[in-house]
Image (cartoon, helix red, strand yellow):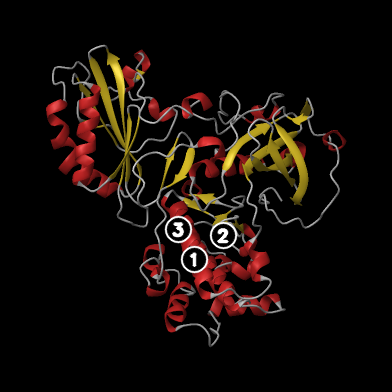
């Protein structure tokens, strides 16, 4: 089906065929002039997944190829567009990356991260896992799922077949084809689409009376944990209706080798009442979960996800290991289905910096970005049109006549007071908290823009984390600390104020 993940398991090995024999567009022997297409990794009703390699960088990728005619005929285009939007929203070390999306008259191509280790299902099929290994996978799963929920994304088809393991043994959540976002909720605040795999689906989903997407995902995580530790399903029955009855009633028994802490956690996760079922935050506070747990710390810069080591103090050089470079940015889809009929390829995840800029030595500062007339208008309350182009959290902006180095240094001083990790690249500063919450550590981005040769605009906004914690930081630390740098006679209104 359209949501088939780019798995490295090959359920139907076939000899490699020339690209032209399958009707795939090529230019100079390459798929769309960039990718060398390899073996078939897997296929579904509407898609095939191939191993491929970027011709310039040599980076291995997985390419999901969808037949556009079938997608249009079966009304899948809205689902495909939603999946693209979701994958761009949930960039996390434990979620399979979407690099770019391309389309021709007949095909749609998802270029995704290639995960070499295969499906977690293949490992469980050989028998139950050791507790420490199962715990590590579960910790990474919960970190990724909690991240998705904090961004209003609900997977709805979590199972070992949709969890991949890379060569480092880290888990990657894949296949967001059945995912929902918060704006799909009905007026009752619930989802009503029946989807998922019966063995892993929550009882309230089976009841078809509406369900909370986050609570349903947590139930699926509990079933996955049971399978990892037991080697079999908690509610399995050859008779489908009998299995449904077991799920409704929560009838399962933990094996004798389960510890007391694990049994207690599973009883709270596999609670048939979604109102009393444990939350992600509570799972992350449980004794069994916390053993050996290392919170996932990362940051997103230049559209890339970077893991964050405990002793890391600056942005690492990406070097040759970065994902394949997308083509030059083109006009993004505006929601009109006619865009699917274009002959040219389109990139939905364009890089924000060129490869030459990315290789520039750290600390080599360039001239700040200049604001044009449209940017200046957008700073005025009531004329902020930027929301038409990208989602923005609560922002603080102000104008200053101070040297840019003074502004950046002051931001770094304020960050250290709150024990934030500081990352700097040119005139951009990232402040990263260490306190974990359901929404992850607070991360704040600050950037300096040139307004005139003597004036600059400083923009500070929350990227990730808890909104209340961010607002508290702005009121108690940021605004008092930066007050002396504000150019009070500036003509732009609402200086040092939260934009609406």
Determine which residue is flagged by label 1. 136
- Check disc 1: other Cα within 10 Å, few if <14, some if 14-19, many if 20+: some
Instruction: Please tell me in which quadrant of the rendered image residue 235 appears.
Output: bottom right
Determine which residue is flagged by label 2. 169
Residue 68 horizontal side relative to residue 123, left or right: right
Question: Which secondary structure, mark 1?
Answer: helix
Question: Seen from this angle, which residue lies furthest top?
Answer: 453
- Check disc 3: other Cα within 10 Å, few if <14, some if 14-19, many if 20+: many
**Which label sits in the foreground, 3 or 1?**
1
x, y percentage for residue 30? 76, 30
x, y percentage for residue 212? 47, 60
| In the depicted structure, whether residue 77 falls above or below residue 43 | above
- Check disc 2: other Cα within 10 Å, few if <14, some if 14-19, many if 20+: few
Who's the residue at 41% across and 63% down the image?
A: 280
x, y percentage for residue 428? 34, 30
Nearest to N terminus: mark 3 or mark 1: 1
| In the depicted structure, whether residue 194 falls above or below residue 101 | below
Q: How many marks?
A: 3
Quadrant in which the C terminus is drawn: top left
Nearest to N terminus: mark 2 or mark 3: 3
Who's the residue at 50% across and 72% down the image?
A: 132
**Which label sits in the foreground, 2 or 3?**
2
Between 491 and 174, the one lying in front of the other is 174
**Which label sits in the foreground, 2 or 1?**
2
Q: Which mark is residue 143?
A: 3
Q: Tell me if label 2 and label 1 are in contact, CB under 8 Å.
A: yes
Q: Tell me if label 3 and label 1 are in contact, CB under 8 Å.
A: no
Question: Which secondary structure, mark 2?
Answer: loop
Who's the residue at 65% across and 75% down the image?
A: 127
């Amino acid at each position: 089906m359209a949501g088939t993940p780019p798995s490295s398991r090959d359920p139907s090995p076939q000899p490699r065929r020339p690209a032209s024999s399958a009707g795939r567009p090529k230019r100079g022997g390459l798929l769309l002039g960039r990718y060398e297409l390899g073996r078939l990794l897997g296929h579904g009703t509407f898609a095939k997944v191939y191993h491929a390699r970027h011709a310039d960088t040599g980076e291995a990728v997985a390419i999901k190829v969808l037949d556009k005619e079938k997608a249009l005929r079966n009304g899948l285009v809205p689902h495909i567009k939603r999946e693209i939007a979701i994958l761009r929203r949930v960039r996390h070390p434990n979620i399979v990356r979407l690099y770019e999306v391309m389309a021709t008259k007949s095909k749609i191509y998802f270029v995704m991260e290639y995960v070499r280790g295969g499906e977690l299902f293949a490992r469980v099929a050989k028998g139950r896992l050791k507790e420490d290994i199962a715990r590590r996978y579960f910790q990474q799963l919960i970190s990724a799922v909690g991240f998705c929920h904090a961004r209003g994304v609900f997977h709805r088809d979590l199972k070992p077949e949709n969890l991949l393991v890379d060569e480092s043994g880290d888990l990657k959540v894949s296949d967001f084809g059945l995912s929902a976002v918060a704006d799909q909720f009905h007026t009752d605040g619930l989802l009503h689409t029946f989807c998922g795999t019966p063995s892993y689906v929550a009882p309230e989903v089976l009841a078809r009376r509406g369900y909370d997407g986050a609570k349903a995902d947590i139930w699926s995580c509990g079933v996955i944990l049971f399978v990892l530790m037991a080697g079999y399903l908690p509610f399995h029955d050859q008779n489908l209706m009998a299995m449904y009855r077991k799920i409704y009633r929560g009838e399962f028994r933990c094996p004798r080798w389960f510890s007391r802490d694990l049994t207690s956690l599973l009883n709270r996760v596999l609670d048939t009442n979604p109102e009393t079922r444990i939350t992600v935050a509570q799972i992350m506070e449980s004794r069994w979960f916390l053993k050996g747990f290392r919170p996932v710390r990362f940051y997103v810069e230049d559209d890339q996800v970077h893991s964050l080591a405990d002793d890391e103090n600056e942005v690492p050089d990406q070097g040759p290991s970065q994902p394949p470079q997308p083509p030059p940015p083109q006009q993004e889809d505006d929601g009109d289905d006619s865009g699917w009929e274009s002959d040219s390829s389109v990139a939905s995840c364009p890089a924000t910096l060129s490869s030459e800029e990315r290789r520039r030595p750290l600390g080599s500062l360039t001239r700040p970005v200049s604001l044009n007339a449209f940017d200046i208008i957008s700073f005025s309350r009531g004329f902020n049109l930027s929301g038409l182009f990208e989602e923005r959290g609560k922002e603080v902006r102000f104008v200053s006549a101070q040297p840019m180095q003074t502004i950046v240094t002051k931001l770094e001083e304020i960050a250290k007071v709150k024990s934030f990790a500081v990352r700097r690249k040119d005139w951009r500063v990232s402040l990263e908290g260490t306190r974990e919450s359901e929404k992850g550590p607070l991360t704040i981005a600050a950037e300096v823009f040139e307004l005139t040769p003597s004036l600059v605009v400083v923009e500070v906004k929350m990227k990730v984390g808890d909104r209340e914690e961010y607002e508290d930081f702005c009121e108690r630390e940021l605004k008092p600390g930066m007050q002396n740098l504000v150019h009070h006679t500036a003509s732009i209104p609402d200086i040092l104020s939260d934009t609406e």
